């Protein structure tokens, strides 16, 4: 099943993940499994609601065995993602993980080197941070993600 994306099509903030997981594939909704539940808590901590933002993935179909999407899979879905970015026209795009970051930035580097600052692409400010699934595997990264979200909050005028 394809998982296109959902949320406020006039959102200031757009989250882009990697690809749907098992739960997302079964329901057709992005970020509803354990990683999605953590993302919901992050959004709440940012003093926002899921309805305030737009959420999608770089790849619209679940890769076999939940593996990382290939470059070809990202390219085959890129026209859909480009359409979503143009339609929502967010002020800020938050790339969750390297798959989204590499496509949006067109750069190949370690996530730890890319995070923590804004880039400009697609007429928006781009912020790279760890995917919620990475936080489930390594909770020590939660502090870094919270630092990144505070950068976003300041940019959109939310008190930190």
Image (cartoon, rainbow, N blue to C red):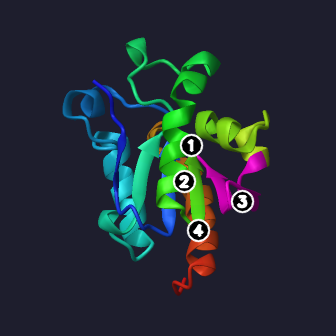
Residue 136: image location, x then y, percent: 44, 41
Q: Please state which of the two labelled residues, at mark 3 or mark 2, is closer to the viewer.
A: 2
Closer mark to the observer between disc 3 and disc 4: 4
Compared to 38, does 1 lie above or below?
A: above
Magenta span of residues: 114-131
Foreground residue among 144 and 13 = 13
Residue in the foreground of this view, choosing between 95 and 60 = 60
**Picture layout, residue 40 above or below residue 77:** below
Q: Earlier in the sequence, mark 3 or mark 4?
A: 4
C-alpha span from label 3 to label 1: 24 Å
Distance of mark 2 from mark 4, alpha carbons? 11 Å
Disc 4: which residue:
91
**Outermost residue toward the top in this view:** 64
Label annotation for residue 86: 2
* Extreme residue toward the left, this view: 27
Q: Are marks 1 and 2 in contact (CB under 8 Å)?
A: yes
Secondary structure at numbered mark 4: loop
**In this orientation, which residue lies closer to the viewer: 111 or 11?**
11
What residue sits right under mark 1 in the picture? Answer: 82
**Disc 3 to disc 4, how far (Cα)?**
17 Å
Q: What is the count of numbered marks? A: 4
Disc ID at residue 116: 3
Q: Is residue 27 above or below residue 115?
A: above
What's the distance in space between the residues labelled 3 and 2, CA to CA?
Answer: 24 Å
Residue lying at 47% horizontally and 59% vertically, measured from the top left: 88
Tag 3: Cα neighbours inside 10 Å, few (<14), some, or many (≥20)?
some
């Amino acid at each position: 099943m394809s998982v296109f994306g959902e949320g406020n099509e006039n959102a200031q903030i757009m989250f882009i993940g990697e690809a749907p997981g098992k739960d997302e594939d079964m329901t057709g909704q992005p970020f509803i499994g354990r990683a999605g539940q953590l993302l919901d808590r992050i959004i709440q901590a940012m003093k926002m609601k899921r309805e305030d933002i737009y959420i999608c993935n770089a790849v619209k179909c679940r890769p076999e065995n939940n593996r990382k999407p290939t470059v070809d899979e990202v390219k085959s879905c890129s026209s859909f993602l480009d359409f979503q970015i143009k339609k929502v026209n967010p002020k800020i795009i938050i790339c969750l993980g390297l798959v989204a970051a590499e496509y949006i930035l067109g750069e190949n580097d370690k996530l730890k080197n890319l995070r923590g600052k804004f880039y400009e692409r697609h007429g928006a400010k781009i912020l790279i941070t760890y995917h919620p699934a990475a936080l489930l595997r390594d909770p020590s990264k939660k502090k870094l993600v919270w630092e990144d979200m505070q950068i976003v909050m300041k940019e959109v005028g939310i008190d930190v």
